Image (spheres, rainbow, N blue to C red):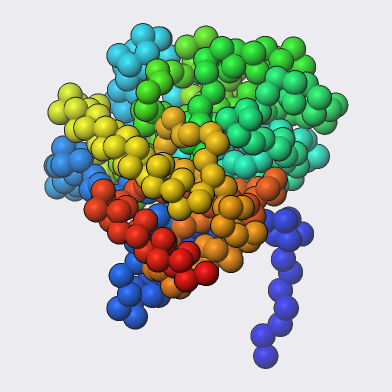
Amino acid sequence: MQRDLPLARRMRDIQPFRAMRILVRAHELQTQGRDVIHMEVGEPDFPTPPPICEAAARFIATGNVHYSGAAGIPQLRDAIARFYDDRFGIDVEPERIIVTNGASGALMLALGVTTNPGDEWLVPDPSYPSNRHFVRAFEGTARSLPVDASTAFQPTLAQVEAAWSPNTRGLMVATPSNPTGTVLEAEEIDCLNAAVRKRGGILLVDEIYQGLTYGTDDHTALAHHDDVFVVNSFSKFFGMTGWRLGWLVAPRSHVGEVEKLAQHFFISPSTPAQHAALAAFEPATQALLEERRDIFRERRDLLLPALRDLGFGIAAEPQGAFYIYADVTGISNDAEGLAARLLEEAFVATTPGTDFGHHRANEHLRIAYTTSHERLEEAVERIASTLRRG
């Protein structure tokens, strides 16, 4: 007879990732012969750019596949530093760049070296769900800042100042944001960091969707600040989700501590993935990625009016990433129920806002335009047909 084994108390506060559960159900339907249109997971549908795959194959063929240093191979840290110089004209020392096992690894390291038990992090609501759970995993508390379309789903200076307490360790923001696709302007980041610095806190900026912006200038918090933690990824703009590679840019004062923690948590990032990522910065790869960005913009421009015509409310248009955060109150009073219905009846997979927080969460769906133009049109038709049935 199996006995009950102890479970850490923190696990009561960590919820499942609904988007992944929806993905599992979508795959079950596909095994039953259903044609599911995937608009639930934040994963580009394009294949990894060929130069990246070719670089990986060349490296693996040598058979010299061993651990790298915990902070990553020097060639890749140098390449990322040159990327910041080429794209933004800023000098980021390679020594401040720690290559990680996906952006999730970067978030874990940043929070691991800064968070004490009982510390509080201010987190926009809605925002990427893992952020608050990482804080909890390090025995901290994520304090929600309710945001809505009136501020483009981004926290304001007044909110941060009002919410700051003696226990507050820092503020986490994302630009472009998941699930809303909205951005923080450089001036807004400057104001937020000034407020955080004045209070002796830390600003952590998620720039995972950097490069995927539409009609607005791309920028980085590193352009004006060397005391912030910046998280980035090879998954989104670079299209390398399954390679599980990202990076963290840390303040100089914390680099050694981050590397020490990385040694224990991860030993090293994937060596083949790192050598593959060197090709991500080649001119031919960058040109292909810019073409793909234009395709995402075209998809957004197709989907926005189509969803509005169906009764979805979109008061804050996304300027980046590949998501639309749609208000469903004109259609339903239950986003979770609507998401389930669209999946089971229309075979269109979306993610309810309850994955991303609590503030008006069950009034929204996150809809990802990570599938082809033709499939988006079909998804709209299927949703329309389902809604007409009442």
Which residue is located at x 71 percent, y 74 percent? 5
Q: Residue at x 52, y 62 (%)?
A: 339
Q: Is residue 159 left or right of residue 348?
A: right
Q: Quadrant of the N terminus?
A: bottom right
Question: Residue drawn 73% across and 78% down?
Answer: 4
Q: Residue furthest right?
A: 166
Q: Is residue 259 visible?
A: no
Q: Residue at x 56, y 12 (%)?
A: 187
- Residue 227 point in image, percent of width and height: 59, 15
**How many marks can you see?**
0
Quadrant assignment, res 23: bottom left
Is residue 229 something one can see in this rendering? yes
Horizontally, residue 294 falls left or right of residue 169, namely left
Q: Nearer the viewer, residue 49 or 262?
A: 49
Q: Please tell me which residue lies in front, 179 or 272.
A: 179
Q: Position of residue 126 (x, y in %)?
A: 62, 42
Q: Looking at the picture, does residue 292 appear above or below residue 40?
A: above
Percent position of residue 203, x then y = 63, 23
The image quarter in which residue 213 lies: top left
Q: Nearer the viewer, residue 64 or 171?
A: 171
Left or right for 12, reference 387: right
- Above or below, 296 against 330 in this view is above
Give how far across and how far down residue 184 sits, in percent.
54, 23
Q: Say above or below: 250 vs 382.
A: above
